[in-house]
Image (spheres, coloured by chain):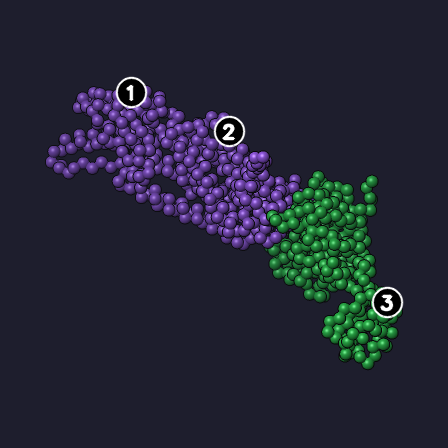
Chain colours: A green, B purple
Amino acid sequence: MADDNLMIKMDSLNKSFGKIMALNNLNLDINRGELLGIIGPNGAGKTTAIRISCCILKPDSGDVLVDGMSIHKDQIKIKSMIGYLPEEPNLYERFKARDLLRYFAELYGVPRDNINRRIDDLLELVGMSHRAEDRINTFSKGLRQRIGISRALIHDPEILIFDEPTMGLDPATSHNIREFIRELKGDKTIILCTHYMDEADSLCDRVAILNQGRILDMGTPQELKSKLHSDIILNLELEIADSSAGKIIESFSTVEEVNVSGSKYTISLKSKKDIKEIISSLEGNIVSINIKEPTLEDVFINSFKN
Amino acid sequence: MKFTTITKWEMKETLKSRKFLTIFFLQISVLFLMIFIFNAFATNIESEKGISITPSLSGFASLDVDDQGRLFTKYINPELITVTSSNYPDSIINLNAGQTTAVVVVPGDSIEKIKTIETINVQLYLDMSDPKRSVVRDEVNTTSKLMADALSNSWVESFTPQNTTPTVVNQQSTGESLAMQIVTKAMIAILLFLPLFLFGNMIIDSVVGEKERKTGEILMAMPIKPAQIVLGKSMAVVGVIAIQVALWMIILLITGFEILNPLIVYFLVFITAIPVIGITVIISAYAKNYKEAGIGLTFGYVAIVGVIMIPTLTYLSNKSLTSNISPLTMVIRLFSGENIPYWQFLIPVIFIGILSIITYWIAVKLFERDDVMFGPRPSILRLTREILGWKKKNKKTKL
């Protein structure tokens, strides 16, 4: 029985480029209105997976069902439902911003009466109204990315696929684009491929960790973080690092793991409960203290360690 | 019909491009230069020496002559026509067998008739299916006139024995000789086909440019079929070629060249552009970059020129129905004012139609393949095998 809430289903996807296996039996479900982040190192297969979903590449085997339609049968319908922003916006340099959006609006079959209004709305949305008549080759990377987002939204798609949308952008522009994606959240189904863990952490409903064409782990950012041995990490630097200090630390019940590197101790804790006591017991020997909760980056690194 | 959107925008952006417009008008100025050079060439070869056609035209047509007195034969231009002395029955057999273009019969008693100042009736039999007949007919007419002038001069000399100046026979040209007309027709026909090969860079930019600038990824994500992309991009270039050919025809007409049946000629040139662009799209789709596409295009265009020119040359030297597969042959025949049966027009049209279908089919197949568009690119052999659906034979292993 079909799941009405399921928007995209990647089913046993395999894809090789020559001898390199980009996707290895990839299975991934994305729900309607969900913002799914795909994180992974370079060459993990993120771009290949989304290019197959956009019907740009063909899988060697397997299928992607978009709203119940197969990429092998209903390419045109699926493409109409998706707004795709590649890593590099790669826009036609000679076009003026407005002409470019008009060209893609016509290709997407946006009704002629709506095209001008739609272009004006989108240019205003991305703060580019004042540059509408300028050529693309006069734009900076950040401005091109904004036009790229407008282009991906021109036909008001149900699904948005962003491949590294903030890659190489300055912090202010990255922040604007993240805020923009946050605004779209819930309204549209979004796939976000990113290298930035904090971006995935702050934006995504769920995150899939991809490596060598397979999903290593998947869940909400909180779930993934909780899968680590501890919730809290206490970093201590001691003046005198001897075995007695280690024994004292390990004696506390909430301590799960202690890693020692010279005079530096990384202590994984189940809870914050014993922190005060640990510090008190080592009083006079402590040079520096740092407490941090696990991040998605820790999850990411931990997944690769495992 | 989303390919029209691609065609419209490709043409719009191309025609707005300064670089393109510079090239476009430069091509027109080259046409003017060619007309100027050709006129200079024509003036030179129509000089006082009489018709002095290029060596490549020597033996261009053949003529059997039944001329026992050899009075006529010595005035025929040997640079243009191969003259064979024969008798009437054998000559007619040769003519029917297509071994000669024409037969001239000079009466056996012509010397006696000259002496008694009687008219000599020279009979000319032409192979009406041979396009070279017009050259031979003109040459025979010119020779007859030369012969008559020489005879009348010798009569005048006989009445004035004091004049010891040797007689010099010059051709008095009134208008263009027919040999020259053939060269002119061939030149105009070739000129009209030239724009077909001048816009390959537009397709390269349109197809290879998508790969190099990586805009192809977005285009392939559009809800349009690869066939529409191929068609849209091709039609934009075919449209530009159509404009250029029309302009060239107008310029040639304005500068005094005669183009018979201009609409049919335009149609033939226009439809030839379709498979030429199809082949250019195939080369561009397979090429990895501009450099590769440029090299491929050079070889491709040499092959296309061969396909167009060889049947035409074959037709001029040895008339054959299959030579009509080349639209150039048909255009030269139209220029000659030949009365061509309608069904013969179908030969180049069908040939071009089949070639267009094949080239666009291959181009679409290439566009449908993600390995060709995004790499790693397969070898030509593997690609051919897979497109044609040939399965690689597995080697049998002995158990």
Q: Image quarter for residue B119?
A: top left
Instruction: Inspect this view and state whether residue B176 appears.
Output: no
Question: What residue appears at the point 64 percent right and 62 percent down from the top-left corner?
Answer: A140
Q: Which residue lies furthest to the bottom in this view?
A: A284
Q: Which mark is residue A254?
A: 3
- Judged from the image, the secondary structure of the residue bearing numbered disc 2 is helix
Question: What residue appears at the point 77 percent right and 42 percent down from the top-left corner?
Answer: A68
Q: Position of residue B271 (x, y in %)?
A: 52, 37
Question: Mark 2 belongs to which amino acid?
Answer: Leu
Question: Mark 3 belongs to which amino acid?
Answer: Thr
| Side (left or right) of B154 relative to A285 | left
Crowding at mark 2 (Cα within 10 Å: few <14, some 14-19, many 20+): some
The residues bearing labels 1 and 2 have C-alpha atoms spaced at a distance of: 36 Å
Question: What residue appears at the point 24 percent right and 21 percent down from the top-left corner?
Answer: B107
Q: Which mark is residue B346?
A: 2
The residues bearing labels 2 and 3 have C-alpha atoms spaced at a distance of: 91 Å
Question: Mark 1 belongs to which amino acid?
Answer: Asp
| Side (left or right) of B229 relative to A183 | left
Q: Residue A76 carries which label?
A: none
Q: Name the subunit of mark 3.
A: A
| Side (left or right) of B112 relative to B247 | left
Crowding at mark 3 (Cα within 10 Å: few <14, some 14-19, many 20+): some
- Judged from the image, the secondary structure of the residue bearing numbered disc 1 is helix
Q: Image quarter for residue A303?
A: bottom right
